[in-house]
Structures are given as C-alpha cells and as structure tokens.
Amino acid sequence: MRALLLDAPGSPSTLRHAELPVPEPGPGQVRVRVEACGLNPVDYQVAGGGHPDWSWPHVLGLDVAGTVDAVGAGVTELPPGQRVAYHGDLRAPGGFAEYALADATTLARVPDALEPVVAAALPCAGVTAHQAVVRRLRVAAEHTVLVTGGAGGVGGYAVQLAALAGARVIATASAGNAEHLRKLGADEVVDYRAEDVHARVRELTEGRGVDAIVDTVGPDSATAGLALLVHGGGVAAVAGRPDLTAVAPFGIAPSVHEIALGAAYSHGDERARAALSSTLTELFALVGDGRLDPMVARTLTLDEVPAGLTELAGRHVRGKLVLSLG
C-alpha cells in the first residue's frame, strides 16, 4: 500500500512516500480502507519529538474515514464494506496510507449521505470541542462563552456547539476571520491582534465576565483567561492547562477541564474509547441536519500532506484540511 513515512523525529517536510505491506487486523481490530484522513496540529507537534511507543518508520494521521476491509477475531458487528470513521490511537500507525488498523470499539458508522472528507474532518477537532462544550463545561442558554482561537478546527466547532446550546458566544480571531465566525454563530468577535482581549470582553459583558472558556491557544492564554471567569465558571484547556496559582484560592472557585482525546487509549478504559465513537455519531447527526458546518477548507492529495501540515504549523488555517484518497 502507498503511505507517507516519518523515518525519525522531524518536521513535516521530512515525510516520504513508500510502499508498505497491508497490515493484518488483530483481535478486536478492524482494517479500514482509507478514503480520507484529517490533518491536525497534533500530527506535526508529535512528529517533531517522536513518541516512545512508535516503531520506525511511522505513519502519521489520526482522523480516518473509509470502509471496513477486514476484521480481527472477536469483531462481529462491523462487516466488510461498512462505512466508518474514527479518531485513532496516537501510539499506533495512522491514516496517511491506503489502509489502517483501528480498535473496533472506537469506530462510528458514517451515514450514507456523508462524504468521507466530511467524516474525516470531524473526529479530533469535533470530538474535542464537543467534550469541552457539552460534556465538561455543560454550556447552556444562560451562559456567556469565550472561545479563543475561534477560526481553527477546535475553535470553530466550539463556537458552533456553544451557539447551538443557546449561549452568547464571544470568539477571538484576526479581523479577517470575523465574518466567518459570525456565520458559525459567534455573537461577538474580538481581534486579538488589535484589541486588548480582556478589556474588550469585560466591556462586552458589562464587567461581569464569562461563564465558560474554551481555550485552544496554550497554557498562558488559559491562565490569563481565569481572570475573566465569573464565580463557579470553568475553563476547558485544549492546548495546555492553566496555572491555578494565578487566582486566589476559594475565590472565584474555577473548574478546569483538561481535554485529552488520546488519553482515552493510553489512560482510559473501554467506556472512554467507546465515547469517542458515540460523540462522533452525535456530530455526524448534527452535520446531517445542517446544524453543524464541518468546515472543510481544502482537500489534499497524499503529495500535498507535508505542505498542509507545515501550513497548519503556521497556526493560521481556517477550518480543516483533509487528505482525500477517494
């Protein structure tokens, strides 16, 4: 099978084409013929340092959509030909290849009307946003929510899910992305390059602050956001946890929710892995109903994936880039 290989820790530019044997599924596994694979920041982030569980050379790519090609022992409910998608195990070979192996528990059935590229855009960023907004922060209609980095994958899905919950949504982004975010459901967009974000959020909320923050930028941003929370508010940290020493103890009483999908494999049990599937199924339904924009910005060929990952590393991609092998 054709694949993109990483021979050693390095930048996306070091990826090379190669032919590999088609992998055989083990017990509880499914082999998927890859039709599409989403690109995510974690691909280039982990590639730079490698992972202790990788065998070299390694195939990147966590968000796969395709069809079941073969099943391992114990798998009875996913026949060959079934359309599926999943967020994969970071420790295992991924989907920048024509075939990939997956834990059957994590697979979500893809509705007939959903294109593979759309299905592959959703797992990592969509499930992360859903965990942050719906499962952990439990955003509701009476809430005001701040989403940092709103134009990215996680940020864009978080804006939409918070708006679907009826919340007032404030997002940070560059001025060029403001109209895009308003179309996704943001009520207000703060230009982080030209405005004092904290002062503007305080102004927009008449000094009250926000009930919840989805931070997609990093630990410094998450820490700074603590000062904007109302009493009992919460932060969902996607790119790094905040430093709670920045606020006095037993004051605003913030809750911190660290979102780490990959840990469903490395530290979770079967229930945690099954939640990846059930959440993805919920997102498919929202896309199918026209309530969630999958935000596919561009599709790529296998040759274009290294450049796509380099573009992601620049942190200015709007929406999702997706490899299409169809």
Image: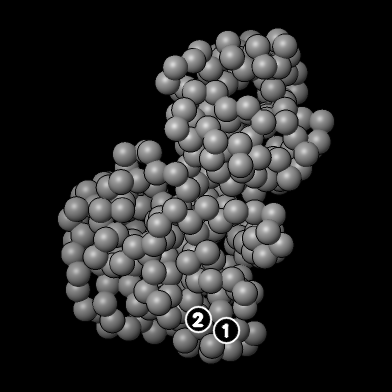
* Quadrant of the image occupied by residue 97: bottom left
Residue 25: give x, y in percent of width and height.
44, 82
Callout 1: SS = loop
Q: Mark 1: which amino acid?
A: Gln
Q: Is residue 78 above or below residue 146?
A: below
Residue denoted by label 2: 67
Q: Mark 2: which amino acid?
A: Thr
Residue 148 in view: no
The dot on residue 82 is 1
As rendered, which of 11 and 167 lies closer to the eye? 167
Residue 110: give x, y in percent of width and height.
60, 73
Q: Residue at x 48, y 35 (%)?
A: 177
Residue 207: give x, y in percent of width and height.
70, 10
Q: Do callouts 1 and 2 mark residues in contact (Cβ within 8 Å)?
A: yes
Whether residue 22 sits left or right of residue 9 in the image: it is: right
The dot on residue 41 is none
Residue 225 in view: yes
